[in-house]
Image (spheres, helix red, strand yellow):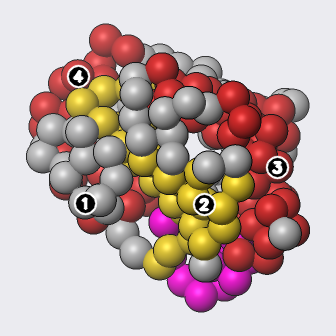
Amino acid sequence: MKKYFSGVTIECASGDIAGQDDMTAVVNAANAQLKPGGGVAGALHRAAGPGLEEECRPLAPIKPGEAVITGGHNLPNQYVIHCLGPVYGKDKPEEKFLADCYRNALWLADEKKIDSIAFPSLSTGAFGYPMEDAAEIAFRTIKEVITELREVKHIRFVLRGGQAIEIHQQCMEKAFG
């Protein structure tokens, strides 16, 4: 499913975040130390190789809502934007921190003249954020920021499983009609 808003394509797709070879940047659901972990961080670090962890080291630690950028290393993408999403029920105000992840990642992408960016569903894995709430925040934030973007023309959500795709498509439809 694709939507078009303010000159930008927004879509939801099923797949592997480390295999988005048509995207200039991918977003890592990072931990504070920017180290390989489970889920998205593990997949991206494994695919990128040890150079990614090395480049991340001096940038850590980051706080909830923050975004930093590195090269893509062995990934098919030029860049990786690392965001630390909030741990649900622990990092307050969690809604603001999650919105800040999307906002800061998009501003960083625009600043670096990145035309396409792929997001996972931030904070919904090990960090426990309810997926529907997280997706609503993601699309609402994108809609708020999108008119300020000059370079970003394609935003993709890369999701695992039918339920995740269904939830994101419903929230995208709600936000963008």
Which of labels 1 and 2 is toward the front?
2
Residue ID for mark 2? 10
* Residue 167 is inside the magenta segment: yes
Across and down, in percent, residue 27 comes to 45, 44
Please indicate whether residue 172 sits to the left or right of residue 20 in the image: right
Q: Amino acid at mark 1?
A: Asp
Which of labels 4 and 1 is toward the front?
1
Front one among 5 and 169: 5
Cα separation between marks 1 and 2: 17 Å
Say which quadrant the N terminus sits in: bottom right
Of the two numbered discs 3 and 4 on the same chain, state the one appearing first in sequence. 4
Residue ID for mark 3? 140
- What segment is highlighted magenta in the picture? 158-168
Q: Main secondary structure of the magenta part?
A: helix
Which of labels 2 and 3 is toward the front?
2
Which structural element holds mark 3? helix
Which of labels 4 and 2 is toward the front?
2
Say which quadrant the C terminus sits in: bottom right
Of the two numbered discs 2 and 3 on the same chain, state the one appearing first in sequence. 2
Please indicate whether residue 158 sits to the left or right of residue 130 in the image: left
Across and down, in percent, residue 10 comes to 60, 60
| Disc ID at residue 55 | 4
